[in-house]
Image (cartoon, coloured by chain):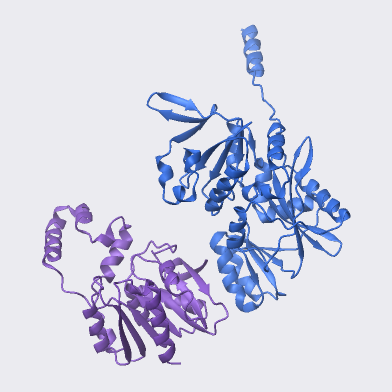
Amino acid sequence: MAARTIRFGECTLDIHYDIVNMSGQKDIIFLHGWGSSKEIMKRAFEDKFQNLRHIYIDMPGFGKSPNNEILTTNDYANIMATFLDALNSDKFAIVGHSFGGKVATLLKPKNLILLSSAGIPQAKSLSVKLKIAVFKLLKPLGFSYLYRFFATKDAKGMPKNMYETLKNVVDEDFSHIFTNYHDKTFIFWGKDDTATPLRAGEIIASLVTNNVFTVLDGNHYFFLDNQNAQEIEKICLEKFSS
Amino acid sequence: MKFAIVFGGASYEHEISIVSAIALKKVIKSELCFIFLSPERDFYAIDIGNMKSNYFAKGDYKKSPKLELTRNGFVKKSFFGSSKIEFDTVINLCHGADGEDGKLASIFEFFGIDFIGPRIEASVMSFNKIYTKQLANMGGLKFLRYVAVNKKDRQKVLTENIVFPIIVKPSRLGSSIGVSVVKNKDELEYALDVAFEFDDDILIEPFIEDVREFNLAGCFAKDFIFSVIEEPQKNEFLDFDKKYKDFSRTETVFKADISEELQDKIKEEFKKIYNLGFAGSLIRCDFFVIGNEICINEINPIPGSMANYLFEDFNSVINDLAENLPKVKKIGVEYKYINEIASAKGKAN
């Protein structure tokens, strides 16, 4: 439980974070997914990677870190870079889950660990396409307050700025970024993931040059299973690039 | 004597207060009722059968009847009118903000409710650790030297020449929340971030390894009543987790093995503090003994589960205290002055 105030452009942001294994010589940083928080990541990994200093972060707008701005994935990466610099982090390893996977990729750590990462857009189902079409039709007529009915499950009860932020980051295509990524990468996926299907993982693995791809049992939150977390730890420790 | 235990509150110590109230349910033999102050600051009458931690964690308390504070005390409103919750004395068991910062003391006093707990000024002085140092100074007590730092001066601390180890604490929190022992410069930044998460003002003190710490609880009811003096067994210092568990304990007191003389000295220091405005409350003071000096480290004006485990006969203590609460001076407003002017004017006309 800690908080650091950093400056980002015109605004100041309170970033809430936790450190575990204070005396670790190298850092492993954990970035949660959309709508999640550092607590979830901590629950899975607190007792793993015991030789590394763990930094668990609530990204702005999630967990305890407040946010009033409309942000892009790039903004998130820049904010995290500023924050990690303030902590004198060596960015030895960054673990990113889902949306956090995209942010982690942009941060270019020595070892990138993606857990069911976002970044490969899925083809939209017909009903979703229809909802968007109807909404676009209604918007000029001043019916935009109806957006709640059309918004994704993620968006319900969300502050307006975070809804705009979600629109910025959702369905972003990171293919070109993955294609040009050459540093050590570990890709882990839940076999039965429905939020980011396994197919997306296979695509990322085909694009990133230097990667170890592992499919484990479970869904989008497969790493919360202790055996899976142990497996992730084991594979990373064997193959970490120093 | 029937007690109403008021617990909860909008505070970082909300959950500790719940644990504390549940512990007292088993300890107090008098008739009891429970009034929960939700994080949204609504009062609820909690059935004694529902006094289980899960009832609150799951939000089930919202099904309990809501109460309003009026000049008649706590009142339950229903379709058919309102009914008063019957009790003689409130035990203010809200640890941390709301309970220990003077807010509840103010409204209880305002609405004329008898209560066990620190009064307004005692609350204000003991809630902020920086003010507590001033209070101790005023009362002629010894205390550890300290530096107070505001969040805007964070950078300055990092460039200071500090002699480690030190202890970093938020200024307005109890139960060791946000407190860290810092052994070297590398650990300092994180400790500052931890403390500043909870408060914009923090305190830095030297950390004295192997210092002997003694806890003494007590109150004044006709005469001073003291608990046994405890020397807590510590693992460097009590962290939040440990203290939290400590709150629900009902036995195992590590009675301090010290001379009568030292015990008396500690009691004298306790009296000095208590007499600075703590009448009406049962407080626990934590002292350090360094060489020949007794330093006051902390005042807990609402100790966890009222430090009942430190007293041989807690029930008689709490009853004695309830019967000897400080009297509130009644202010009679007679409109004498206005009436005099009016009648004088009348004559002039």
Q: Between residue B303 and residue B25, name the one nearer to us.
A: B25
Specify the quadrant of the image occupied by residue B65: top left
In-front residue for pair A11/B279: B279
Q: Colour of chain B?
A: blue
Q: Is residue B164 above or below residue B122?
A: below
Q: Is residue B156 left or right of residue B297?
A: left
The image shows residue B258, relative to residue B190, as above or below, that is above
Above or below residue A187? Residue B114 is: above
Q: Is residue B291 left or right of residue B15?
A: right
Decide which of A85, B250 is in the foreground and name it: B250
The image position of residue A75, as x and y in percent, is 36, 73
Can residue A106 be seen in the rendering of this structure?
no
Query: Which of the 4 image quadrants contains residue B26?
Result: top right
The mark total stands at 0
From the viewer's perspective, is B108 left or right of A164? right
Task: Tell me, by letter, which chain the rendering colours purple.
Answer: A
Locate residue B288 relative to residue A116 in the image: left or right: right
The location of residue B72, given as percent across then percent down, is 54, 26
Splitting the image into 4 quarters, where does residue A176 fall?
bottom left
Q: Is residue A95 visible?
A: yes
- Give the residue displayed 37% in from the left and 82% down from the top: A113
Image coordinates for residue A174, horizontal then vertical, percent? 26, 80
Residue at 88% over, 54% down: B261
Residue extending farthest to the right is B261
Residue B180 in the image, given as x and y percentages of width and height:
62, 67
